[in-house]
Image (cartoon, rainbow, N blue to C red):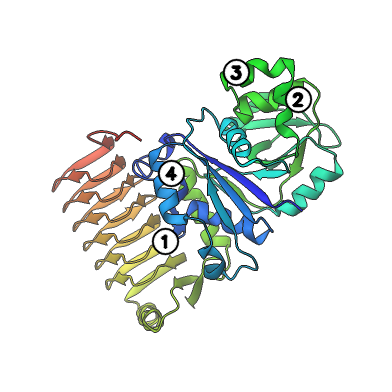
Amino acid sequence: MIKKAVIPIGGDATRLRPLTIETSKGLVRLLNKPILEHSILSLAKDGIEEVYLGVRGYVNYTTLFDYFREGYWLQKKYGLEKEIRIRYMPRYESTTNGDAVWYTMEYYGIKEPVVVIQGDNIYQLNIQDMYKWHRKKNAFMTIALQPVEDVTGFGVAKIDDDYRIEYFVEKPRPEQAPSNLANTGIYILSENFWEFLNEGWAKEMKETRRLDFGGDIIPALIEHGYEVYGYPMEGYWFDVGTPERYLNAAMYLLRHLSPEDMEAVEITHDVYMQGKSEMSEDLRRKFREMIKTGKLIVEGKVLLGRHISIGKGTALEDAVIDNYTIVGRNCEILHSVVMDRVKLGDNVRIVNSIIGRHVEIGNNVRIVNSVIGDNAVIEDNVRMYNVKIWPHEFVERGATLEHYTVRTGVPRR
């Protein structure tokens, strides 16, 4: 049984900006809780007892540690059979994901098999089943492979009949792809994994710290005859490293997760609400009555957070509304995520967009295909199409923005 996991979380997560300007990508909220909490919970349910976060940089470390700390509270919150311990990589300027995993394992003296997952992945996979496959194949390294429709953004594997990986093609054109099996960034490493760095051919890799799994380590291992196998994933997998992928993941999970998985109660068909207190139950009754009488219009699936307020005449379709958010009258929120402590005025229309935390939006605002960073203020009568707003920014009354980014600077991380 495999009991340890290492999660490298480094870099500035530039692809997910502006949501990651001031917080780790692992703490970006997805279905009303941090992305990384989904992954750690899944690991814990699969029997993982220790999670090591290979964090790089001040923002990543401080925001992750302040939220997760040592992780003991997760057992009580989720009713886990065992405690799960979270430990952090000391200050070390890792250059790549593999470098972070190597240093973390060296520092903590880990000499047993580990599972590696990426900090911006959401997945459905039984880690112990993957480990059994790894042992059965006598593999040096096993990589979870996921069929994808669009191969152009991934490393794509060529495998033999036994699922041994012959080579990868990075981000191929469709006609160049050897298969549709993408590298998910979920790996099982054998107990002696890092001993390959003692080989003569690996000397330069070690000295220059060229230890990216996809770009350096995996191609080198395959080239030098190591047993690298694929593992066929059957569940879902999302790299939520861009706003578009984040929104796709949120909508998929909203449609496919059970109420229990979302920590929610179904208040009417396909409308789910979180919260366990008497106050939450009163709010569920209120929204149930609003839907029944047509004062709140709902299509598709909807997840509502705790202690929210929604005005009369509002329409929701495939939407996530996070905790403590106030939605005014006659609003439309379609295929969008509105994070916690947001305040929306009246007659606001939000389509295919992500609204960050603690945002204030005035009356008669239209937001389409856009991402609003934390603590931004949008005044009345604003129109936005394909716009990104950095945290703490201000958009004045009546402005119309198209294909535009509002930012005054990016803080040092």
Amino acid type assigned to the residue bearing label 2 in the image: Ile
Q: Secondary structure at mark 2?
A: helix
First in sequence, mark 2 or 4: give its number.
4
- Seen at 47% across and 71% down, the residue is 272
Q: Which residue is mark 3?
A: 207
Q: Which residue is mark 1?
A: 320
- Seen at 51% across and 56% down, the residue is 70
Disc 4 and disc 1: Cα gap in Å? 28 Å
Q: Viewer-nearest of labels 1 and 2?
A: 2
Position in image of residue 287 (x %, y %): 37, 78
Say whether residue 161 is visible: yes
- Seen at 69% across and 28% down, the residue is 218
Disc 4 and disc 3: Cα gap in Å? 26 Å
> Residue 222 shows which numbered tag?
2
Disc 1 and disc 3: Cα gap in Å? 47 Å
First in sequence, mark 1 or 3: give its number.
3
Q: Which residue is mark 4?
A: 61
Label 2–label 3 contact, CB within 8 A: no
Amino acid type assigned to the residue bearing label 1 in the image: Val
Position in image of residue 278 (x %, y %): 40, 84
Residue sitting at the far left: 397
